[in-house]
Amino acid sequence: MILVALAAIILPLVLLGGLNLPATRGMGISAVIVVILGLVFWHLSPAVIGASVLQSFHKSLPILWILFGALLMLNSLRATGAIDRINQGFKALSADMRLQTVLVAFLFGGLIEGVSGFGTPAMVTAPLLIALGFSPMAAVILALVADSTPAAFGAVGTPLTVGLSNVTEKADLLNLIGQRITQLDLLVGALMPALLIFILVWSFGPKKHRWQQWLAVLPWALVIGLVYSVVALITATVISYEFVSIIAPFITLIVAIVSLHYHWLLPPAVQATPWQTAMAQPTAPATSTKTAGSMSLLTAWAPYLLVVILLLASRVLQPLKLWLTNHLNLSWTQIMGFKTINSDWELLYSPGTILALAALIGLFIQARSLKAALPTAKKVVLSMGNTAIALVVTLILVQVFTNSGLNSANLPSMPMYIAKFVAKYLAGIWIIIAPFLGELGSFVTGSTTVSTLTFGQIQADIAANAHLNEPVVLAAQLIGAAAGNMICVHNIVAVSSVVGLDGQEGTILRKTILPALAYAALIGVAGLVLIKLI
């Protein structure tokens, strides 16, 4: 039975990662097989399968809406020439792609994660990287890998507040778990900028002198990573876990910009001969070079700044949050009468709505007209067909897997069956296993929060039975779940669509799985050390 339960994990790895099938085919085949296995071995009723399919269609809509907003933003910025102006601004700060990777993918992406989450950061940062000259493949992989460390705290602490709601709602315990996350990640998370530069140099740069090109900026990357980790630790300890993923990237971004301005810890070569990739692509064409050159940097960045402001306001200002979540709420609860089969879509609160609104306002500010809005929106919608199919079949697999607890065979759900099977034999070294379980949850469900909702209680139970420190184990779960963003199939599908890499999902998965597994392994080791110290 364990092989049946693991089918939802093994099949995507084999079909996408091994056979390199596009997500539309690979995930479609996987979904059909998992549905059949659910009917035969888990004794799922046709009604449960039907409700799961309907849930999948509905759950795809909020994701596609976020994707629409991100693509509308990108195409609007291209139409006005703002994307070229942003490119000029980054190059004025540093034309070195190694440093741009940290600034855009890790720090700016981390800020977007802190105010939005839900897969938005990679969809925002990947197009920016392409505008800076990165190849689409490099942009996607760097954006996905970077959206890991900040995702443990997600959008204003959602992975803890919501993800651990089945375990505890006590603010003191949640804050303690938040502190344990920053302690576990103090050194491991600090390596993320260096890892991103390593991936860039080793996988996408010239083959000569790769070690030297990485080592040249390693001191700067380590200091930036350490600043991020220390600020995160201080924020979690002194303020609250809810603001870690906002304050840490924001302050670190300021430190990074100042360090580049004064050339701290950087060799002269980053100015004299900035490092470029061998497969760099030309910047996407704008309407006119003159438009880009005459536009102020503030005007060019206005839509993104507006996104950050609106997302932050909608998540922090409780009266506004309440109004947005209660109006135009398109959520579907108790699908086909099943109390646990639900799908949320608060349209006004969605990052997709904010991205689309910011894109339209930005278009008006930059072009003094909304004439291009409708043609741009039509172009975006027409480009999303394959992505919609891939997302729906992926979510069918996910929801049948997740809802499999509603069976007549008196079996736990497939994810719980896997967790209990693993726990039975590996409880003695559970702190090492805990982050991998979190990562597994995100790989299948596509969310740090949902992974923690799924596995949080069993992580707590195992910690109690094995006499392990519960906050440390739960912290390892959350960090592992965040690292799972690198390999989450529907995140890969969505980001690939933004940059025009449909059908390359298997290649992307093969390139992100090793960093994801390495991250979880290092967190497991850090957990062993932390448990002995406290």
Image (cartoon, rainbow, N blue to C red):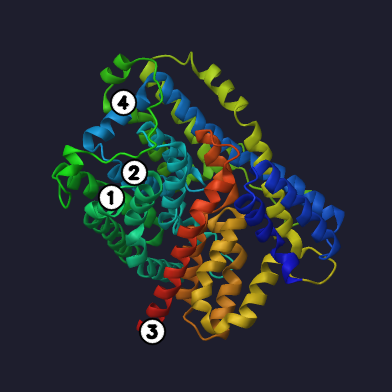
Q: Which mark is residue 532?
A: 3
- Could you tell me if residue 242 is visible in this image? yes
Q: Work out whether mark 4 precedes mark 3 in sequence or the reverse, and give the earlier one.
A: 4
Please provide percent x and percent y for residue 239. 33, 61
Distance in Å between CA atoms under marks 1 and 3: 41 Å
Classify residue 251 as left or right of residue 438. Answer: left
Check residue 393 in the rendering and tell me which mark sits there, or answer none: none
Visible residue check, residue 169:
no
Within 10 Å of disc 2 (Cα), the crowding (few <14, some 14-19, many 20+) is some
- Residue 124 quadrant: top left
**Residue behind mark 4:** 85
Q: Is residue 183 left or right of residue 408?
A: left
Q: Three-letter amino acid code at disc 3?
A: Lys
Earlier in the chain: of badge 1 and badge 4, it is 4
Report helix, strand or loop for mark 4: helix
Q: Considering only vertical position in the picture, is 84 above or below 49?
A: above
In the picture of the structure, the residue carrying the numbered disc 2 is: 206
Label 2, secondary structure: give it. loop
Left/right placement of residue 404 relative to residue 324 reads right
Image coordinates of residue 259 in percent, x first then y, are: 18, 48
What's the residue type where badge 4 is placed? Arg
Gap in angstroms between the C-alphas marked 4 and 2:
27 Å
Front tag of 4 and 2: 2
* Whole-percent x, y for residue 140 in the image: 47, 43
**Which numbered mark, 2 or 3, is in the foreground of this view?**
2
